[in-house]
Amino acid sequence: MKHLSKPLSLLVLVGALISGEPAWAAPGTSPHSWQRWDHALTSTCNYGNPYADVTLRVTYSGPAGRAFHAYGFWDGGATFRIRCAFPTSGIWRWETECSDTTNAGLHRQRGTVDVAPYRGDGSLYRRGFLKVSDNRRYLVYGDGAPFLWIADTAWAVPQRASPEEWDAYLKDRTAKHFTVIQVGPASAWAGERDRQGEKPFTDKTCAQWNPAYWQGFERKVQRANESGLVVLLVGLMEPVSRYPESSKACLFARSIVARLFGNFVIFSPSFDSEFMPLANEVGRAARDATAMHLITQHPGTPWSQPTPTFSNKYYDEPYLDIAAVQTGHNAGHLDWCAHHAIEWNLHLYRHEPHKPVINLEAMYDAQGEKGWRAVDARSLGWRTWLSGAMGYTYGAGDLPPKVPRGSGAVWKWVTDPEKYDYWKKALQWESAFQMHHLHDFLAAIEWWRLEPAHELIRNQSNDVTRRMVLAKTAANDLAVAYLPDNAAIEVDLSVFRAPLTARWFDPVSGRYTPVTGSVANEGAHSFVPPAKGDWVLLLQQE
């Protein structure tokens, strides 16, 4: 693949500079555990449409009897590729199986890979692919360490940004301690071509992909991983427009999973759609293509409903690892936004058997005046985290269609420097820094032990937009409460096992204000914030 040689060398070099170990094993070299490994195969047969006419499978087997299956993918001309990120060091073996058994270049090819332990500084490569915790409440790295999900919506950015702009975006988001970015594949509303002028498919039915487009796409995913960011890829069932026939959507899902099999990626068939059987069909195709990656659904928002009906319909599907929800923008209805962020997350949290709950989209900050403000994006994050979810996704940009200023900001990558939501300006909106504060507050405590306990609030507001939320640990040694705009919060402290220390946290500035003295763990106690505005109360065992 001559047009891959220069980017590949650059990626290996940049990965080495970032992590101390390359994040992509160069051809002919031995990979390290969790590092992307790539092997090219050459077809000995010609096909009218090699993307669809032939299926390439591969089986990997390694130490301690571990084995898993994957697919290969067509990458242009006579080239097919298989990829992997090996979960442990040691000798791994691979063997292919081709649907065309006469193809000597693809069928019954075999090899061994000597995988070394990873010794670099890359946070993802040191810890391994994400998985569900043992209690099925939150996500962990492969080594079991809790994974704190603070995500950003970058839907069209891989398609619309240049490589240099993409790197600037990644640098900014990692500096603000985001841990996940959410992207779409090649949405028609983002344009027909990427910044290199490549189309994603050769026709509008998605019958055959254009390898050059997806090579550029995968390089951006790889760069995100090297920067320490996990990628959630949404819209497998609509890679360009809504909706291709099931067979083509499932083929794309299988192919893109194979292409990104060596990357830290989570897959979602749906992208802001109502419940659809097609999403389940594509979800099962994605699960058939990987047992190594997590799968979820990014549903749309069923407005003003008491429960998240779309999420409910996906919940019990065996392929689904994460119970995701979009509490949504709700056309600017702040009461609906607040209700959904609290009640919908609680509803999914209480569902059995348990699955981690993550709010994949809420009201964005679009520099609005009566909604779509920094406080809206910020407050919905705190409501989400204290109502049973173990992850929150932020967005910058977009206003309701009737508001003339809206054009997209970060997620649609506005490139006009004169616009209020030019991407360089939007990256620095105050709400993004407030996600930094949200992350750092949670990272300083054992957030994964928190459980919603709103019933401990004794002076709850009847106004849902001013409704307070509280979560505590089962051990009753830690609690966090959020006050959207309240004069005081009265908390029943009798459940706590010892006296407490209290601190106020300002979610706007990220600064703490201590409460003088200890607080007895008996009866109800009223806590008064230091000033007007929204505040977070942190209670810890003395």
Image: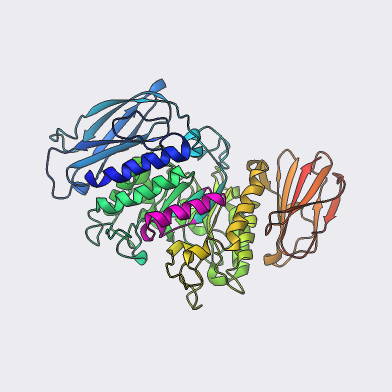
On the picture, is 386 further left or further right than 60?
right
- Estimate the x, y position of residue 302 in percent, counting from the top left: 51, 64
- The quarter of the image holding the N terminus is top left
Would residue 305 be counted in the magenta stretch? no
On the picture, is 415 further left or further right than 109?
right
Which residues fall within the magenta stretch? 153-179
- Estimate the x, y position of residue 288 in percent, counting from the top left: 34, 41
Q: Nearer the viewer, residue 122 or 467?
A: 122
Q: Residue at x 19, y 33 (%)?
A: 107
Q: Colour scheme in the image?
A: rainbow
Q: Is residue 124 above or below residue 166?
A: above
The quarter holding residue 139 reads top right
Would residue 154 be counted in the magenta stretch? yes
Q: Nearer the viewer, residue 43 or 347?
A: 43
Q: Nearer the viewer, residue 147 or 339?
A: 147
Q: Is residue 362 above or below residue 31?
A: below
Mark yes or no: residue 239 visible. yes
- Estimate the x, y position of residue 493 in percent, counting from the top left: 82, 47
- Estimate the x, y position of residue 395 in percent, counting from the top left: 52, 60
The quarter holding residue 204 reads bottom left
Mark yes or no: residue 270 visible. no
- The quarter of the image holding the C terminus is top right
On the picture, is 274 further left or further right than 482?
left
